[in-house]
Amino acid sequence: MKFKTVTKEELEVLPFDDIAYIILKEKGKKMKITDIFRIICDSLELGDEVYENQMGDFFSLMSTEKRFIQLEKGYWDLRENHTAEISIKEIEDELDDDVEIAEDKYEDEEEETGYYDELDDSEDDKEDDDYKDLVVVDEDEEFDANL
């Protein structure tokens, strides 16, 4: 459907997002949202008051409509004109880099802290000596603080 061939009566029954889609499709390039809405308001002869009062609603409508994509500096375009090129090789390389970084970090931690198995057995015995004066008190027995 060409925007130039659409009558005012046909435009009046279309929602704003459909009209915006037709405009962007025909232009074939990105446009500022203010320009898109201005074309819609002028085509429907809505006037400046409607333009000013409903600009925020139009922005919300465009933001939630998946057919459109917001670009930088107030420009909008059809999402179909902006496909993401994903390279499986690039993703695999990024994953490999992440794994290598994680492995390097793990190796650094091992060097800093050492392995548990490398501890001297005499250190374990010293820890057991800390508990030699420990007294177990039954809850039912009265505790004598003078012990």
Image (cartoon, rainbow, N blue to C red):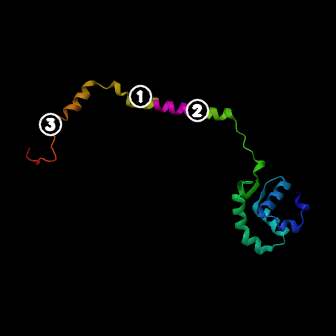
- Say what amino acid the circle numbered 2 marks: Asp
Residue range highlighted in magenta: 95-106
Write down the quadrant of residue 50 in the picture: bottom right
Nearest the viewer among 114 and 6 is 6
Neighbor class of circle 1 (other Cα within 10 Å; few <14, some 14-19, many 20+) is few
- Circle 2: element type: helix
Q: Which residue is mark 1?
A: 111
User: Is residue 104 located in the magenta-colored stretch of the structure?
Assistant: yes
| Above or below: residue 59 compared with residue 142 | below
Q: Seen from this angle, which residue lies furthest right?
A: 5
Q: Position of residue 74 (x, y in %)?
A: 72, 58
How crowded pointer 3 is (Cα within 10 Å; few <14, some 14-19, many 20+) is rated as: few
Give the residue drawn at x 53%, y 33%.
101
Residue 97 shows which numbered tag?
2
Q: Residue at x 80, y 66 (%)?
A: 38
Q: Is residue 130 above or below residue 33?
A: above
| Label 3 vs 2, first from the N-terminus | 2
Q: Residue at x 83, y 65 (%)?
A: 39
Residue at the image position 19 percent from the left and 35 percent from the top: 131
Alpha carbon separation for disc pair 3 and 1: 36 Å
Image location of residue 42, percent across then percent down:
84, 69
Look at the image and tell me in which quarter the N terminus lies: bottom right
In this rendering, position of residue 63 left or right of residue 5? left
Q: Earlier in the sequence, mark 3 or mark 1?
A: 1
Badge 3 is on which residue?
133
Q: Is residue 91 found left or right of 69 in the rendered image?
A: left
Q: At label 1, which amino acid type do we have? A: Glu
Give the amino acid type for the residue marked by disc 3 in the picture. Asp
